[in-house]
Image (cartoon, helix red, strand yellow):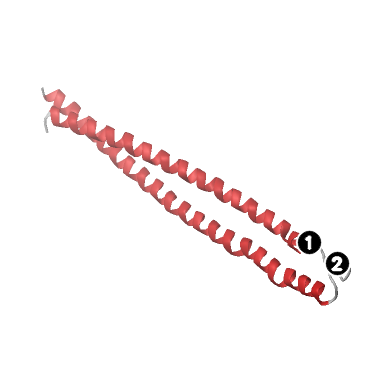
Amino acid sequence: MDLGSINSELMQIQHSVFSANLNRDEKKEELKRLQEALKELEGCDTDYSESKDLCLKPEFTTKTFHGEVATDVEGFKEDELQVSYTGISDEQLSKAKTEISDQMEVIEEEISSMGENITTMESRHTSLMEKKEQVKDKQ
């Protein structure tokens, strides 16, 4: 290998390492945003759990509605409204949290792979630098 081709390859590797570091930093930032979103969703989950009794208010009595209507309204609130309300937390929020966690795992694997590639490129760079010195010494 001559000095010109070594220098050319060194520049390509430097560019690739720089680009890979930028991509890895972007992935780290994406992971950070997902972690924050997951934390926020967990807060929503807590808020939903703490507020589930609100869908049972106001209470209807025989003074508010007459007879069977009051019983029907109360039954609807307990049997359907509260079940639907808790379904948001139990199903939708859980699904969203799972999807975010899965995406976080994918990104963590990508970051790890990028790190390995960067290490490989840096090793190649070091090897070429040594080769460059050997070629210089022979001239």
Which residue is farthest front? 66
Which is more toward the observer, 109 or 57?
57
- Asked whether the beta carbons under mark 2 and mark 1 sit within 8 Å of each other, the answer is no
**Which residue is pictured at 55% across the width and 48% down the height?**
37
Circle 1 crowding by C-alpha within 10 Å: few under 14, some 14–19, many from 20 = few
Q: Amino acid at mark 2?
A: Thr
**Which residue is pictured at 55% across the width and 56% down the height?**
97
Where does label 2 land, which residue?
Answer: 64
Identify the image quadrant of residue 69.
bottom right
**Which residue is pictured at 44% across the width and 49% down the height?**
108
Q: Nearer the viewer, mark 2 or mark 1?
A: 2
- Alpha carbon separation for disc pair 2 and 1: 13 Å
Note whether 68 is above or below 17 in the view shown: below
Note whether 8 is above or below 104 in the view shown: above
Residue 115 in the image: state x and y as whole percent: 37, 43
Q: Of helix, strand and loop, which one carries label 1?
A: loop
Q: Relative to 118, is 63 on the left or the right?
A: right
Q: Amino acid at mark 1?
A: Lys
